[in-house]
Amino acid sequence: MLNKKPWFSERLSDSIFLKFTGFFILLGLSAAFFLLFENAFQEEVRLKRDLISWAGHLARGMGPEPPSCGDAFG
């Protein structure tokens, strides 16, 4: 019974372990959300770049002609 750890030190080490575990779980979730939103942002930037390029080709007359009003109904 002399070598037994005090109850307080066991509770303290469990509490510290739980805090670190929770911290690393939150850190992992934050990293996952960051990567998800970063990929979505990069895709949005790529789509905008393609749209600007397409509009530039149209403005210079190098791309397909925009549809006329009659094409939508005919």
Image: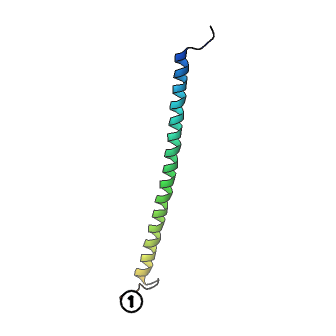
- Residue 51: x %, y % from top left: 44, 72
Where residue 37 sits in the image (x, y, percent)? 47, 54
Query: What color scheme is it?
Result: rainbow
Q: Residue at x 47, y 68 (%)?
A: 47
The quarter of the picture where the N terminus appears is top right
Instruction: Reply above or below: 19 against 65.
Output: above
Tell me how many marks there are: 1
Is residue 44 depicted above or below 12 in this figure?
A: below
Task: State the image coordinates of residue 24 (x, y, percent, origin top left).
Answer: 53, 38
Choose between 55 and 34: the one closer to the eye: 34
Mark 1: few/some/many CA within 10 Å (<14, 14-19, 20+): few
What SS does tag 1 mark?
A: helix
Rendered position, 8 above or below 72: above
Where residue 56 appears, as percent x and y from the top left, is 42, 76
In the image, taking residue 14 as reference, residue 57 lies left or right, namely: left
- Residue at x 43%, y 84% (from the top left corner): 61
37 to the left or right of 4: left
Q: Nearer the viewer, residue 25 or 64?
A: 25
Residue reaching furthest to the left: 69
For residue 30, above or below residue 19: below
Residue position marked by numbered label 1 in the rendering: 73
Residue lying at the far front in this picture: please name it: 1
- As rendered, which of 49 and 71 lies closer to the eye? 71
Q: Quadrant of residue 17?
A: top right
Look at 51% across and 45% down and name the residue there: 29
- Name the amino acid type tagged 1: Phe
Q: Quadrant of the C terminus?
A: bottom left
The residue located at (48%, 65%) in the rendering is 46
